[in-house]
Amino acid sequence: MIHEPAAPPQPLQAPSPRYPIEALRAGRGGKVVLDVRLATSGRVQRARVTHSSGDVALDHAAQQAVLGWTYPAQATPRDFAVPVRFQIDAR
């Protein structure tokens, strides 16, 4: 029997990261992927950049935002990937 990995939990609260003003002014965007360790309490214990956007300010903003996210309580700690995308909307 093959077991598929469980889908990552959905956050209860996930405020968007602040777009760093210097990246916004320069028109820089990108995708950051974080390796997240979730405690049984539902709090994020660790958010480590595993795939950089190529911009340190964007990476840091994503990391700081995800560290503040909350999830439902879990029976055991969990590790999973969280992608965070920074995109400037053309209006």
Image (cartoon, rainbow, N blue to C red):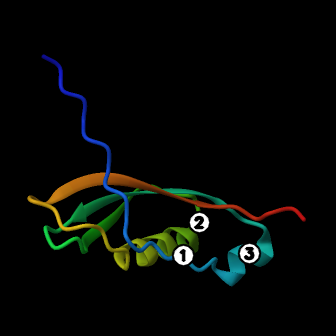
Q: Are marks 2 and 1 in contact (CB under 8 Å)?
A: no
Residue on which the image places disc 3? 24
Name the quadrant of the C terminus: bottom right
Give the image location of residue 68, x and y in percent: 37, 79
Circle 1 SS class: loop
Q: CA distance from mark 3 to mark 2?
A: 11 Å
* Residues packed near mark 3 inside 10 Å, few (<14), some (14 to 19) or many (20 plus): some
Give the image location of residue 66, x and y in percent: 40, 71
**Left-right relation of 26 to 64:** right
Circle 2 SS class: loop
Circle 3 SS class: helix
Mark nearer the N terminus (1 vs 3)? 1
Q: Is residue 90 above or below residue 24?
A: above
Q: Residue furthest bottom?
A: 21
Q: CA distance from mark 2 to mark 1?
A: 14 Å
**Mark number for residue 55?**
2
Q: Residue furthest top?
A: 1
Q: What residue lies at 79% left-to-right and 77% top-to-bottom?
A: 25
Mark nearer the N terminus (3 vs 2)? 3
User: Looking at the image, which is closer to me, 89 or 9?
Assistant: 9
Mark nearer the N terminus (2 vs 1)? 1
Q: Residue furthest right?
A: 91
Q: Amino acid at mark 2?
A: Asp
